[in-house]
Amino acid sequence: MRIFNSKYLKPFKNIYIVVLAVFVVWMLFFDAHSWLFHHELNNDINELEYQKEHYKNEMAKDNKAIKELSTDEGIERTARETYYMKKPNEDIYIIEYEDSIAKQKKDE
């Protein structure tokens, strides 16, 4: 009986404090709406908001590219730069620098 007379365990003689302690532990860790579950959901919300901002930025870039390609000059410039297309009776010279050319092995 000396164990229950300890000054640290004395508050647990009161049934209300015991019930309150069990309730708090239950709500923090074991309930379907526990603090741990809400913490995970908040992390998911933060990640989704970051992805939302990323996709908004990508949409802005794509809208800019679409606006640029809606003109004839934009289409011509993209065709020339990306696909190396040319007009009839026109020569295209592609200049490659040494640092852009892949180096070959000495054995070959």
Image (cartoon, grey):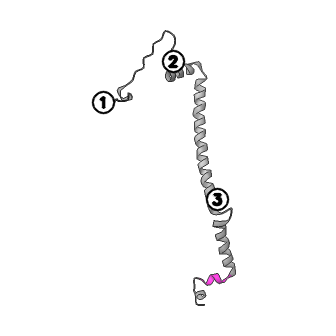
Which label belongs to residue 85?
2
Q: Nearer the viewer, residue 70 or 96?
A: 96
- Local packing at callout 3 (Cα closer than 10 Å; few below 14, some 14-19, many 20+) is few
Question: Residue at coordinates 68% horizontally, 72% vertically from top-left?
Answer: 23
Contact? badges 3 and 1 (CB < 8 Å): no
Mark found first going from the N terminus, 3 or 1:
3
Question: From mark 3 to mark 1, how far is it between C-alphas?
Answer: 62 Å
Q: Position of residue 90 (x, y in %)?
A: 48, 11
Which label belongs to residue 107?
1
Question: Residue at coordinates 61% horizontally, 31% vertically from top-left?
Answer: 63
Question: From mark 3 to mark 2, how far is it between C-alphas?
Answer: 56 Å
Q: Is residue 41 magenta?
A: no
> Residue type at mark 2?
Met
Q: Which residues are magenta?
A: 9-14
Question: Residue at coordinates 49% horizontally, 20% vertically from top-left?
Answer: 84
Furthest toward the front, the residue is 107
Judge whether 49 appears above or below 2 on screen. above
> Residue type at mark 1?
Asp
Mark found first going from the N terminus, 3 or 2:
3
Which residue lies under the disc numbered 3? Answer: 38
Judge whether 15 appears above or below 52 on screen. below
Q: Is residue 10 magenta?
A: yes
Furthest toward the left, the residue is 106
Question: Residue at coordinates 66% horizontally, 69% vertically from top-left?
Answer: 26
Location of the N terminus (image quadrant): bottom right
> Is 93 situated left or right of 6 in this image?
left
